[in-house]
Image (cartoon, rainbow, N blue to C red):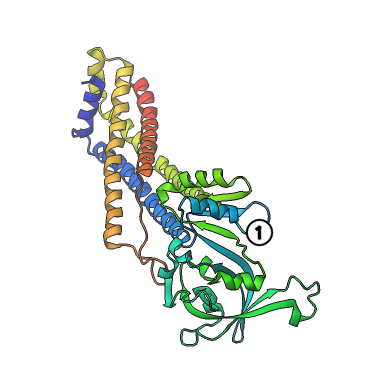
């Protein structure tokens, strides 16, 4: 066994001659323990929120979305032929901003026309909180978001009243005459869905034939929404893009919400740096602990020196002492952090409090990459804070 490591282990677990040195040594372990546990818990909770937010988007948005590079709509005939030849499940949709009027309330929302395969792409029919999903694609029925229903004061008991839809009449050059400036049609709300506030307050789903008719779009669509397993997204995306050419944009889930991903990653990085900075401050306990230990072991150092140990050997002994102290704190801190995360997952120790939250308790998601990051970060901080007093004090003692 390495001589310096052997002596460092003896110093770590042996009783110090002065009780205050003993207490300071335990305090340095405790500071590393608390900082490590805090990093594990906070990053795991942040992962939980990120996973929850992204899952809400994924419940409405498809795995792959195809749109045109130029313009807004297209017939997508060449795209659908490629998808059909490869037996790929897809759905066509057509979106447009419209003015809604329900009884005496008005609201601007996005009318999304969907076909009969839309609910198989994202399971929107499982997100209903009242009523039914689109049950007849030949008639003018619709499903509204919970936020839209709220702004229109659409109660469940009178939900089946007519919902008036107004869109600008593009064939009219003048909008001065309101009677001819807008095309008006009616929809019958048959259900209300709830995914998350951004979707709930924006979308109304209706048969794509109705939306094409009111917009005079023939057989055109805004998007082709493709279903596939998460593990196959990148491979299928590249395959589709290669076959349909550069006239179309083939976006995966990350690319559909690239800005959201950047925000979440940036926030996580900021939290990581803040907690790491706090850990650096807490690790100054190691400097005090090693300094006091070297003073306490001054006679031992002199004895080792008489036996032939040089300054480098003495420095390595106390450097390894600080590293071992850090490692003990890391192991205990990660164990406690993981245990707290497990308790939160199993029993929900911390709740979100009163309010209309998507989940009752704080979400937690432990990732191996984060554990490795925490281990490396705390190890580097511990090694640096151990080197300073070990190098300086060994020089002073000699």
Q: Please tell me whether mark 1 sits on a helix, a strand or a loop.
A: loop
Horizontal side, residue 71 vs residue 151: left or right: right
Q: Position of residue 207 (x, y in %)?
A: 54, 72
Q: Position of residue 15 (x, y in %)?
A: 18, 34
Label 1: which residue? 72
Q: Is residue 317 visible?
A: yes
Residue 232 against residue 188 in the figure, above or below = above
Q: Which quadrant does the C terminus fall into?
A: top left
The residue shown at (28%, 24%) is 317
Which of these two is toward me, 356 or 216?
216
Horizontal side, residue 391 vs residue 145: left or right: left
Residue 8 against residue 71 in the figure, above or below = above
Q: Position of residue 188 (x, y in %)?
A: 54, 81
Q: Quadrant of residue 185?
A: bottom right
Q: Which quadrant does the N terminus fall into?
A: top left
Horizontal side, residue 51 vs residue 347: left or right: right
Which of these two is toward me, 372 or 378?
372
The residue shown at (46%, 71%) is 194
Horizontal side, residue 22 vs residue 196: left or right: left
The residue shown at (39%, 40%) is 373
Q: Is residue 202 visible?
A: no
Q: Position of residue 151 (x, y in %)?
A: 56, 78
């Amino acid at each position: 066994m390495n001589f310096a490591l052997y002596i460092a282990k003896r110093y770590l677990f042996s009783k110090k001659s002065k009780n205050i040195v003993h207490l300071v040594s335990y305090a340095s372990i405790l500071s590393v323990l608390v900082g490590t546990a805090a990093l594990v818990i906070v990053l795991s909770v942040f992962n939980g929120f990120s996973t929850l937010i992204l899952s809400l988007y994924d419940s409405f948005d498809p795995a792959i979305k195809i749109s045109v590079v130029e313009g807004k709509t297209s017939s997508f005939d060449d795209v659908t032929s490629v998808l059909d030849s490869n037996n790929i499940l897809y759905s066509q949709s057509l979106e447009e901003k419209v003015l809604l009027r329900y009884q005496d309330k008005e609201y601007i929302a996005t009318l999304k026309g969907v076909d009969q395969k839309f609910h198989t792409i994202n399971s929107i029919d499982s997100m209903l909180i009242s009523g039914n999903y689109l049950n007849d694609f030949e008639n003018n029925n619709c499903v509204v978001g919970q936020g839209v229903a709220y702004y229109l004061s659409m109660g469940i008991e009178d939900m089946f009243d007519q919902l008036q839809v107004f869109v600008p009449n593009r064939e009219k050059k003048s909008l001065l005459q309101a009677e001819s400036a807008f095309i008006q049609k009616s929809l019958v709300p048959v259900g209300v869905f709830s995914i998350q506030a951004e979707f709930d307050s924006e979308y109304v789903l209706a048969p794509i034939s109705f939306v094409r008719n009111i917009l005079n779009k023939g057989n055109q669509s805004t998007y082709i929404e493709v279903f596939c397993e998460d593990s196959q997204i990148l491979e299928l995306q590249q395959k589709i893009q290669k076959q349909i050419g550069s006239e179309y944009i083939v976006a995966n889930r990350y690319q559909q919400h690239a800005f959201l991903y950047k925000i979440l990653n940036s926030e996580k990085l900021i939290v990581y740096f803040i907690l790491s900075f706090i850990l650096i401050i807490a690790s100054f306990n190691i400097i005090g602990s090693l300094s006091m230990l070297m003073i306490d072991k001054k006679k031992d150092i002199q004895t080792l020196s008489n036996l032939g140990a040089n300054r480098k050997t003495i420095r390595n002994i106390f450097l390894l002492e600080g590293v071992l102290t850090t490692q003990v704190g890391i192991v205990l801190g990660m164990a406690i952090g993981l245990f707290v995360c497990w308790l939160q997952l199993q029993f929900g120790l911390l709740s979100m409090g009163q309010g209309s939250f998507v989940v009752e308790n704080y979400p937690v998601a432990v990732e191996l990459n984060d554990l490795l990051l925490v281990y490396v970060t705390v190890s580097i901080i511990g090694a640096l804070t151990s080197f300073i007093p070990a190098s300086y004090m060994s020089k002073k003692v000699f």
